[in-house]
């Protein structure tokens, strides 16, 4: 259901399942969509928990496809 909610908001992020049994997911967002996504998540009709860790990854120049 979370994936459909995110898709309904013009794909503000990409939802990926980390652990189906526990329902743990990650949502990849951009700096431009972060605040809006947080607001949406706080207003969902079901409870969610946020992890303390936020990882920000950027591709290295060696791995970039130009």
Image (cartoon, grey):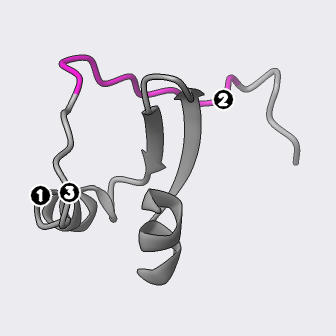
The stretch of residues the image draws in magenta is: 51-60
Relative to 13, say whether 5 is above or below. below
Residue 62 drawn at (x, y percent): 81, 21
Distance in Å between CA atoms under marks 1 and 3: 9 Å
Task: Work out whether mark 2 precedes mark 3 in sequence or the reverse, and give the earlier one.
Answer: 3
Q: Secondary structure at mark 3?
A: loop
Residue 54 drawn at (x, y percent): 30, 24
Residue closer to the observer: 16 or 57: 16
Instruction: Kindly give the residue lying farthest to the front in the view shown.
Output: 21
User: Which residue is at a point 27% across and 62% down the rendered structure image?
Assistant: 37
* Residue that mark 2 sits on: 59
User: Which residue is at a point 18% across and 34% down the rendered structure image?
Assistant: 49
Residue 12 drawn at (x, y percent): 44, 68
Residue 10 visible in the displayed image: no
* Residue that mark 3 sits on: 46
Residue closer to the observer: 52 or 25: 25
Distance in Å between CA atoms under marks 2 and 3: 34 Å
Q: Is residue 43 magenta?
A: no
* Residue that mark 1 sits on: 42
- Badge 2 crowding class, 10 Å Cα cut-off, few under 14, some 14 to 19, many 20 or more, is few
Number of marks: 3
């Amino acid at each position: 259901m979370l994936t459909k909610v995110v898709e309904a908001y013009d794909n503000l992020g990409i939802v990926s399942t980390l652990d189906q049994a526990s329902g743990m997911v990650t949502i990849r967002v951009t700096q431009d969509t972060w605040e809006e996504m947080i607001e949406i998540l706080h207003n969902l009709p079901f409870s969610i928990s946020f992890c303390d860790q936020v990882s920000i990854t950027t591709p290295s120049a060696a791995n970039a496809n130009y």
